[in-house]
Image (cartoon, rainbow, N blue to C red):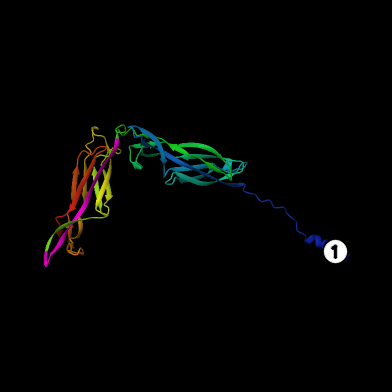
């Protein structure tokens, strides 16, 4: 009886064992990547042009994957959306969720508005305003793999610009900016004073152009002087004789508030009184394609002491 009672007690203390099933997410990842380019005009050296390709940076790309494709035989709804942009080299890369049997990804490369540029001696010159049409396509992607999708944009003229068919190129302008100082002249023991011009390094120069051929509106260019006070501008313009384009430019430097210093006979500088050098400007007319205008000097003089 004691043994029987013990057996009954042990059986009563046993718990019912349950088999647990854990749902496993059978998904992984895929790298979707590629390179996006756009066309550029390249002179062939014989009066004609060829079309090349350069990187298209800052292009928006989106990838859409439906959840019912990612989790088949489920009640999943909605979609996963991934976004990225191309870098300076036109490359993009984004990691998306996928599965082992493959899912359909809807890939969209967005349209954009830009310029159709020209490559001259390795230097890119801004061209007419254009539109670049993107694309949308589907691609089956599988986890653990890469999916490479490249795309080349071709430009189309924006019809609102009536000068798209005009020959657009560049005009070149250069010059220098100097500032007038007092110059100490030592002759024996006699000190006299005159004036001298010294170059202004790293100084901002402005150019207002009356009509940009891409936007059909005025445009302001800026540049900085080099160590010797020299500056240069490359202006986007049209060929001579294009109707409705006077192509006049005003180069100027604004009022300069500073001291009028003295260059001592030993070439050291002595700080002078504070005041203003008034604005200076030069008007250049008829700046057309291939024009070169050299030697446009602007000098800060006529100092006005406070």
Image quadrant where one finds the C terminus: bottom left
- Residue 306: tell me if it is visible: no
As drawn, is 91 to the left or to the right of 117?
A: right
Work out which residue is located at the far right of the displayed protein and give it: 1
As drawn, is 43 to the left or to the right of 243?
A: right
Position of residue 173 measured from the top left corner of the image (x, y, whole percent):
24, 44
Prevailing SS of the magenta stretch: strand
- Which residue does the image show at 19% across and 49% down from the upper left? 297
Residue 162 position by quadrant:
top left
**Element type at mark 1:** helix
Q: Is residue 183 shown above or below 122?
A: below
Residue 122 position by quadrant:
top left
Position of residue 87 measured from the top left corner of the image (x, y, whole percent):
43, 46
As drawn, is 102 to the left or to the right of 220?
A: right
Magenta segment includes 189: yes
- Of residues 126 and 189, the one nearer the viewer is 189
Work out which residue is located at the far front of the displayed protein and give it: 188
Residue interval drawn in magenta:
168-191
- Residue 107: tell me if it is visible: yes
Magenta segment includes 214: no
Image quadrant where one finds the N terminus: bottom right
Position of residue 121 measured from the top left corner of the image (x, y, whole percent):
34, 41
Residue 287 position by quadrant:
top left
The residue beneath circle 1 is 5
């Amino acid at each position: 009886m004691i043994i029987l009672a013990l057996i009954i007690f042990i059986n009563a203390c046993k718990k019912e064992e349950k088999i647990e099933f854990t749902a496993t997410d059978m998904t992984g990842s895929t790298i979707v990547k590629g390179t996006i380019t756009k066309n550029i005009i390249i002179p062939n050296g014989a009066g004609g042009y060829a079309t090349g390709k350069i990187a298209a940076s800052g292009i928006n790309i989106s990838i859409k994957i439906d959840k019912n494709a990612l989790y088949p035989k489920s009640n999943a709804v909605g979609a996963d959306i991934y976004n990225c942009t191309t870098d300076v080299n036109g490359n993009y890369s984004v990691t998306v969720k996928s599965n082992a049997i493959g899912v359909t990804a809807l890939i969209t490369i967005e349209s954009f508005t830009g310029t159709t540029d020209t490559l001259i001696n390795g230097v890119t010159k801004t061209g007419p305003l254009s539109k670049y049409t993107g694309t949308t396509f589907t691609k089956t992607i599988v986890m653990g793999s890469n999916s490479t999708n490249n795309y080349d944009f071709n430009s189309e003229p924006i019809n609102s610009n009536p000068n798209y068919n005009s020959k657009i190129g560049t005009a070149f302008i250069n010059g220098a900016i100097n500032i007038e100082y007092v110059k100490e002249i030592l002759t024996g023991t006699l000190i006299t004073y005159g004036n001298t011009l010294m170059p202004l390094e790293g100084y901002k120069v402005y150019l207002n152009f009356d009509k940009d051929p891409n936007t059909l509106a005025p445009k302001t260019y800026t540049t900085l002087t080099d160590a010797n006070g020299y500056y240069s501008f490359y202006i986007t313009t049209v060929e001579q004789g294009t109707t409705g384009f006077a192509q006049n430019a005003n180069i100027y430097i604004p009022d300069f508030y500073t001291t009028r210093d003295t260059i001592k006979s030993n070439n050291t500088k002595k700080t002078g009184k504070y005041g203003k050098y008034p604005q200076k400007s030069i008007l250049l007319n008829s700046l057309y394609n291939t024009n070169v205008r050299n030697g446009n000097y602007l000098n800060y003089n006529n100092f006005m002491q406070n």
